Every structure is written in C-alpha cells, then in structure tokens.
Amino acid sequence: MAVNESNILNRLYFIAGCMFIFGLAVVFKLLSIQFLQGDVYRAKATERVVKNVVIPANRGNVYSVNGNLLATSIPKYDIRIDALTPKTKTFEKHIKPLCDSLFKYSGKPSSKFEKDIRRARANRNRYFLLARNIGYSDYIRLRNFPLLELGAFKGGLIVEQTTKREHPMGGIAQRTIGYERIDDKGNVTRPGIDGAFGIKYLRGVDGQRKKQQIGKGQWKPLSDANEIEPKDGYDVYTTIDVNIQDIAHHALLAQLEKYKADHGCVVVMETKTGEIRAISNLGRNKNGHYYERLNYAVGESHESGSTFKLMALAAAFEDKVVDTSDVVDTEKGILSFYGKKVRDSKHGGYGKVTVSKAFEVSSNTGIVKAIDQAYRKQPEKFVDRLYDMNLNSDLNLPIIGEPKPIIPDPRVKNGRWSGIALQWMAYGYGVSFTPLQTLTFYNAVANDGVMVKPRFLREVKEFDKVIEPFEKEVINKEICSKETIVKLQALLKNVVEKKHGTGYRLYSKNFSMAGKTGTCQKDYRDKEKLNYISSFAGYFPAENPKYSCIVVIHEPDKSVGYYGADVSGPVFKRVAQKIYTDTPLVDEIESLEVKMGAVEDEYEKFYKTAQIYKTIMPNLVGMPAMDALALLENMQIDVKVKLNGNGVVKAQSVNKNTKLKNNQIIVLKAS
Amino acid sequence: MIASSHSADKKVYEIARLKNEVKEMRSAFVDGRSKLMRLKMESHVIEVMKDKGLAPSVIPPKKIKVKKTQN
C-alpha cells in the first residue's frame, strides 16, 4: 500500500474510532455499574462492615410466693485452653501446678490432666476443653489457676460464655417450674410454668440495631434511627411456697425410697384460693435415684380407687338415695356381679355396717352395695350427678399435658359402659383422674362446696409494676348442697379420728386432719404385673381447713407395704405437721399487768427496806440474792458486794444495823 | 470528625466491658443466692442441726397478743 497522506489519515481515523468506541464502552460499563447494578453492590459493600445486630431480650424470672428465685437466666462458662499458645518455658513451668489445681477442682487425677494437655500440645490442639458449663464462682476459681491466670495471649485461656436457664432450687419442683427448650430442628419442648408462660410473658421481644464493625470484633451502633428497642420479659410470680415445697419434696422422697416405689407426687393447695403451694413429682431412674421426671400431678391420669368413694357418696347423698346411717351388708367381704367379684381388703368383710362406717373402714363391698342398690335402675342419674359436680371436665390448666377425666356413660356409644361399670365406678375403677383433678374435688369439699380452680400464678410483673394479676377462679359455686358437704366433711374427719378408720395411724392429738386413703390396684388384668397405687387425699385442719393435699405413690414394693395410709399418709401428715408448727397459736390476754399477790408482797417488802436502809446494813437473810445485790448497790454509800452462790441469801458478813463505810466489802452467801 | 469517631469507638469498648461486668456480677449474685437458698432450706437446716441434737419442734410457737382496751 502506498504511503500517502490519505492512507495515514484513514488509519488514524480508524484507530481513533476504535479508541472512541472503547471509551464509550468503558463509560457505559461505568454507568451501568453505578446506576443499573449500583444498589446491589452498594448493599454488598455495607454488608461487610454494617449489620443488623439482634439485641436479645432478657428472659424474665420466675419467683416463688415469698419472692425467692425459682428460675432465672445466668451466664455459664466453658473453659478451654489453647495448648499451643504458651511458650515452652512458661508451659513447662506451670503445667504441673495447673494440673494439681485441676485435680483439686475436679477430683480427676492430676497425671491424667497432664497427659491430656501435653497430648493436646503435641497434636497442635488450640481448643482443648477443661470444664464445661460451670457457674460464675467456679469460673473465677479456674481463671486464677496457674497458666490460665496469664490470660489469653500468654496462657492460652479461652472462655466461652452462654446464657443458661438456671433453677436455684435445684431439682426441687423442677418439672413444675419448667423450661423452654428449642432443639436443632426447631421443635420446642415447654413443660411447666416457664414453658407455659414463655411466649406470653417471660420471653420479651428481641431488639434490633444497625451496627458498624470497628475492629477487635466489636460493633458500634451506626445511628439511633431504625432500631427496635429490646423489651425484657416480664417476671412471673408463682404461688409456690419454697418452705412447704421443700418439706413436701423431702417427705415424698423419703417415702418413695422406703417403699422403693416407681414414682409419686404430692400437691398442696390453699383451700380458699386454690393456690398451689407445693407440687412435687419424683420418679425413679435406672440407677434407683429419684428426680423430677414428669409432671405426674398434672399429666398422669389413673384409676382413683378408694379416693373416688367420696365422689360416689357425694352423688348419692345429694340425690338423697343413700344416707350416712343406712345399713349395708358387706356380705362376708365378697360381692359378685356378672361373675366378677368385688372384694374387701379385710378377709370376711365387716358384717352389717352403716354407710359411714363402710366409708371409714374403706369397705369396697359396703360402698358398692349402697351405690348398686341406689342407682342400679338408673345409672344415668349417678353419672349426671357426677357431671353436675364438674367431675367430667379438665381443669384447663396453663401447664400442658392435662388429660380429660374418664367417667363411663351408658348413653354414649363406646362410652366404656358395661354391666358392671356402675358397681366398679363406686369404688373407683373404670374412672380416671389426675391427682390434681381429684385434689380439686377434695378441696371443694374442704371449701364448703365452692370448687376453685387450682392456680400456679399470682401475678406477672415488670419490676414493681403489676402487668397482670391473677384472681381466684371459681369453677362451681356450689358443687352440692350444704347438708351433703357437712356429711362428707364428717366422714373424712372420721377416717382419721375414729379408731376403726383407715387413716387412724396418722392421727395426731396436736392437730386435726381429714382425708381418705386409697389403695388401688394397677395392671390388674395380668396377675404377674399386679401393682398398687397408694394415695391419700384430704385437708387440714379438719375444722376451718387451710390447705388440702394429695399424695399419690405408684407401685410401692409390695413386700414393704402398699396401703394408702402407710405409704402415702406419712407424707400428708408431715406436710400438715410442718404447716401446723409454722403457724403460731395466738393467745389473747386482757392486759400484761397481771397483779399476783406474792409478787406484790415481795416487791413491797423490798421497797420498804430500800427506803429505810440507806447507810445502815439491813437484814438480807431470806431475800433473793438478786434483790439483795440491787439493794446494796443502790445505797447512798458505795459498798463492794461479793456474792457466793445464787438463790436466797443465807448469811451476810456484816451484821444488820451496822453503819456502812465507803468501799466496805460485804460477802453474801446464798444457796 | 475522625477524633469524635474514635472517641465513640472507645465508648463502645467501654460499654462492652461494663456489660460483661454486669453479666458477671449478675451471675455471681444468682450463684450466691442459690447457694444461700439451698443452705437455708429447712431440710438442710434439720440435717446440719442433727449433729447438735436439735430438731424442729412439734408444737407451734405461741404468740401472746394483748387485747386493746378501749379507754
């Protein structure tokens, strides 16, 4: 190609054009990044240094009725060591003393610690666990151990802190106080009060805040705008009384251990208000230790046995088909219906007895006979009466897992009705209640017929401000007539106070109780597996009841004993006794100034002597030594008195009517 | 601008430190309190006093109340 001017120019234009297009492309890309994709990138950029930090709300506390902490959130610590960080010199210097301290702390041999830590160092383990989930005081102790006290950079100490829910009372009432736990899959388990009121009150609302990274792993808030304030959870005040709970727990534990029972529960309820003062549920694990496993009192429905006789008689009295003075024949202790037999625990029965005695001795045949005669033709009436007393409905408790009571009904298909249902119901088989449901009925009897709902909460508070108070809830203002109630109360009282009563072994002349024993067979379809449920339900004091209480113990060792009065009764008595001895008896007197002749006389005599003898020695023989001492020391002359012995003055070293001198020593002998 | 930003940063560190301190104090408090609660529980007191031959009374305390006379 010839080299001429136009060729050069053309080439120049071409290059310039290309460069212009390239420039345009750059500008276009720039603009597109800036404006088209700008937001995405800008967001990405801020994400690195700015983030929305969740400020977790503090979970509220659970308190007892007298203000003791039952559940609270506190930090727990995991202590680890970075085995590689310490220099060889420091490591060798401190490793022995550290392991000795760890031995003192944990009881594991020092040599094992040393071997493990040395191996961790050899394996270049920078994250070796020393202690997991320890409390604050232990954490402080560990932090001051040799090597660890040098800190993170020299000693390799690693501390990780997590917030844990803690029950200061330990295992006591744990199941009722409860917790809220979320597992890896997001499933929530929430037993007890802590679980039931977790979402509504305790949890609080998490806050949110925009923060910017500023190094050292810290974040600083960007602005005050666009943040959500965290709201701490409310505090929940329960009705549980720590002292009663403590006694109930240990009394139950002692009985369970004595009778090697499988599990048991005890509930104490304030009669007037329905407030639960104590609730203890203990079950045995594989090693034979007892601990709070399940909330048996709320969640375990079982056949009531003899404790149901009260409900049966209540219905019969109310319908006026049976009365306490009616005589029934216990027929030598065996009744037969459709080939099935009702037996008395006493071989041979009780002969012909009144209904009230049949109840007091807990005669199965006696009660069954009375109910059978009264309702055989119209079992619906009996069932309806039970319904009227709210026995068929659950208590609608906040704690989850309460089953509905079971009462057979002849009118309902598949209603568990059979030819012997009525008779079996009369002594507590075929029906099923939780301990708390049974207790609610007994409490209604104690409370003169007013059935109150058991409750666990007193109020919900935010610091001192009451957010939600809980009032007592009445389920039924009058479960039956006054007359019936009086009869039932007398029956329950007699069970304990009459010599023939099944609860007489619990009788105490110091304080009164009323209640009903129950010894119920469990798994009776298979003779091999036959076991017992021993229970005691009642209230105290018998007049003007303050508390009602139920004790249910499952599967006591038959060789040790299984009767309700022996197994469960003592727990009831211990609780009653505890509450009795804790409530002072009030003695009212008219006036503190009681004038006693002898005292008055003596005082007059003393006063007279003191008035006359001011410088002269009086006759002190026969006077109480303390009076004589006071008399001499209050004289106008300073004398020194030496008193030998105590009681009444027998001899004085200075004769009477002698003039006394300053600083004279007088010796008094008394005996 | 830079100075005030640094002073703000300093405050953040300070707050973080204090917060940690509060947490530690709180856990020390709860720790102590739960220890106390276990110590003062009746069952524990009974056990400790057993060695000294003391047991809870079976009769309740008596409270003497003087009736107020009207004059």
Image (tube, grey):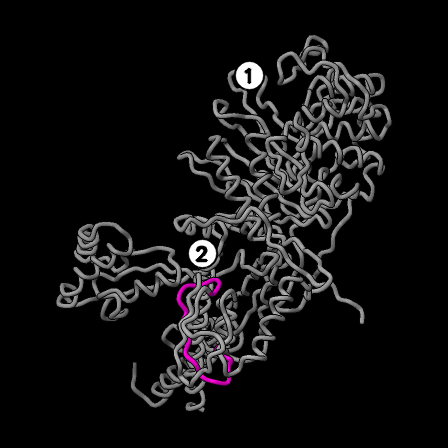
Give the residue type that dot 2 points to.
Answer: Leu
Could you say which is closer to the camera, residue A198 or residue A140?
Answer: A140
- Please name the residue shown 77% across and 17% down the image: A328
Query: Is A67 inside the magenta-drawn segment?
Result: no
Name the quadrant of the C terminus of chain A. bottom left
Cα separation between marks 1 and 2: 47 Å
Could you say which is closer to the camera, residue A129 or residue A365?
Answer: A365
Same chain shared by disc 1 and disc 2: no
Dot 2 corresponds to which residue? B39
What segment carries the magenta color? A632-649
Q: Residues within 10 Å of mark 2 (few under 14, many from 20)?
A: few
- Please name the residue shown 59% across and 34% down the image: A569
Name the quadrant of the N terminus of chain A. bottom left
Give the residue type that dot 1 points to.
Answer: Asp
Q: Residues within 10 Å of mark 1 (few under 14, many from 20)?
A: few
In this rendering, the answer to whether A141 lies above or below A333 is below
Could you say which is closer to the camera, residue A228 or residue A134?
Answer: A134
Could you say which is closer to the camera, residue A307 or residue A51?
Answer: A307
x, y percent for residue A57? 55, 65
Dot 1 corresponds to which residue? A526
- Circle 1: element type: loop
Q: Is residue A509 visible?
A: yes
Q: Chain of mark 2?
A: B
Check contact, mark 1 vs mark 2: CB within 8 A.
no
x, y percent for residue A293? 50, 40
